[in-house]
Amino acid sequence: MIKFFRKIRQKLVSENKFSKYVIYGVGEIILVVIGILIALQVNNNNNENKKHLDEISMLEDLKVDLEMADQKVKVQIELFKNSQDIHYQIYNESIGKASYDSTLRYHDIVWHAPMRNFIGENYASRIGEISDERLMRILRDYLWREELALAAIGEWNDVKLNKVRPFLDKNGLYDNQVAFNDEPYEFMTMGKDGIVINYAKFSALYGTQELDQLLYYLRHSASWALHCMGKLEDANTNVILALDYYINGELIKLDSIKPLKGYY
């Protein structure tokens, strides 16, 4: 191609057709410029396509992680519901509306529940990679809900560590005969043959102001954590649905998904 244009130029020069040579030269420059612009456009399109494919890959990973996170939240919700059942059992016993339940793990009031903001840790810094403002807004709502749930669980853990355990310590309510079983290196077997809390001593404190206040803190913090985790589940459903729409190219459907409003 280059040789072809060179021959044309040489022919025009040899024939002293200067005006045609100038016109030809301008035309050649225009062709070169057009070629460059086409190449740049192709390159830009390739870059945009790669960027979009990278975004889709990241969002597909996010969807998988959200599904895993949702399962972890469901496990936590069941744990908190079980704990709240114990709080209510103890309260009802203390006011004479229930009697001792040998199947209940009363010592679960001791344990706390760790939780990580898994999605926030892995995706909060990557939210700028999302090109659609609607999807970004829905994900931001989830990340906020995750932080709220994390804070609520932290509040519950604080009650356990700084109120429940000091109360049990002060009143000598741990039962070492139960705790020191024949599996000294296994944590989960503590209380397998009974409750680690001495029930006789514990129930003797029913109706005292200190235990009543403790039960209030447990009931309050557990229900708030359950509420926040329930809203987190709703936000998770929203994000996964939005991701499906976006990944499948059904962008118009994103308008139908609205972030949750407020705490409640």
Image (spheres, helix red, strand yellow):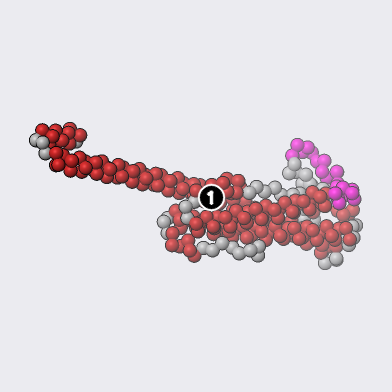
The x and y percentages for residue 145 are 62, 56
Q: Is residue 172 magenta?
A: yes
* In the image, residue 55 above or below residue 249: above
Above or below for 148 versus 261: above
Q: Quadrant of residue 204?
A: bottom right
- SS at mark 1? helix
Quarter containing the C terminus: bottom right
106 vs 29: above or below: below
Closer to the camera in the image, 119 or 136? 136
45 vs 165, left or right, is left
Whether residue 51 sits left or right of residue 233 in the image: it is left
Residue 141: image quadrant is bottom right
Percent of width and height locating residue 181: 80, 41
Q: Which one is in front, 124 or 118? A: 124
Q: Which residue is mark 1?
A: 127
For the question of whether residue 240 can be seen, the reply is: no
For disc 1, the neighbor class at 10 Å (few under 14, some 14 to 19, many from 20) is: some
**In this rendering, position of residue 84 left or right of residue 119:** right
Q: Residue at x 86, y 51 (%)?
A: 167
The residue located at (54%, 47%) in the rendering is 126
Q: Which residues are magenta?
A: 166-186
